[in-house]
Image (tube, rainbow, N blue to C red):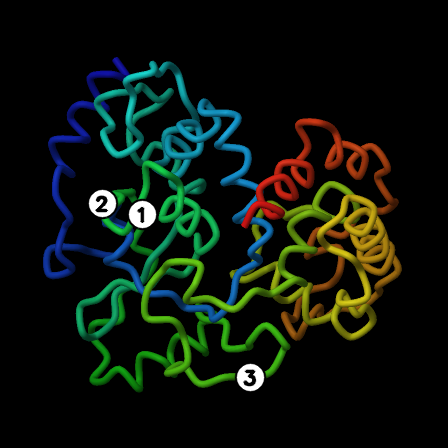
Amino acid sequence: MYKLWLTVGLLLSSSVVHAGTVSQGDVIRVSLSDVHPTQPSVGYDQVFYKLGRFEHDTKKMFDEVCEANGQKGLTSYSEQSNPKDLTTFECKEPIGARTKDMKTVVIAPNGQYYLTDGHHTFNVFWHMPSGGDDFGVHVVVDKDYRDLASMEQFWEAMIADGNTWLYDSHGESIAHSQLPSTLGIEHFQNDHYRSMMYFSRDVGWNKPSSPVPFLEFYWSKEVRKAIDVSEFDLMTAEGYRTAITQVSEHILAMNTDNVGESNKSTKEMGQFDAFDQKGLDKLFRDTGKVTYMLDYKVRQ
């Protein structure tokens, strides 16, 4: 039955839906070149981890494509499968079955799509060997701003709604005009603190059930006040282990009701009660996230 639903979904979404025919809450298919970023930086190392893992674990690549399309995960694939062609592999559920797992866009007054969640995942899809700017993926239309009179009003609303992150990789505020105009990691600044937040998951914190947009960046604002990541050798496992350990310990020691000016407490933002040593050790196994990342990173 799922295979039938997948076929129907493909027929309904065989080409990009234009904003003129879209409503808030819809699941639509876009090409990566159709979406505009709403943050100036990403954690390069998070992207490197996924690219490195995909080199060794093809199943994981297809699994992530299924999840991004709201299909829970992968059921089957073959050597002939291509992530650009959804008919060549099978996912567990129909497209859009799990909207909570999908990335989100908003529609601007000019009819264009702005990505509000998924900058790391979509940059991975952009750079993986079978990806590219024409890679198609399904997203959820989270909000429609077309009733606003101008793009300036749009950006004012985006800021008020928390749908954009206007701080650079040094924590300094920027104007929306300084945002990248397209995906592609080379268009983004590299925020090491954002990478630290990704790799410290399951060590000192994890995403809460209802995370705020740009969750990791709010945490980063706090961490950068106390820790200078430039002091660590982030090209080595030893340096990365030390950095993640210190970041996690700082997160665990934090006690505030306003993490990074999010108006959320540390517990609401996912703070653990204690340091998880098993979570740290897992990162550095032969198949660990940091291991995959460093293997890929040193070859760049």
Pointer 3 and pointer 2: residues touching (CB < 8 Å)? Answer: no
Neighbours of disc 3 within 10 Å: few (<14), some (14-19), many (20+): few
47 with respect to 289 (left or right): left
Sequence-first tag of 1 and 2:
2
Instruction: Please name the amino acid that badge 1 sits on.
Output: Val
**Is 164 rendered above or below residue 47?**
below
Image point (85%, 47%), residue name: 273
**Is 270 rendered above or below residue 276?**
below
Name the residue that disc number 1 marks. 139
- Percent x, y of residue 58: 45, 25
Name the residue that disc number 3 marks. 173
Q: 144 or 129, which is in the foreground?
A: 129
Neighbours of disc 2 within 10 Å: few (<14), some (14-19), many (20+): many
Instruction: Please name the amino acid that badge 2 sits on.
Output: Arg
Q: What element carries label 2?
A: strand
Pointer 1 and pointer 2: residues touching (CB < 8 Å)? Answer: yes
Sequence-first tag of 3 and 2:
2
Question: Residue 29's mark?
Answer: 2
Image point (63%, 77%), residue name: 171
- Number of numbered callouts drawn: 3
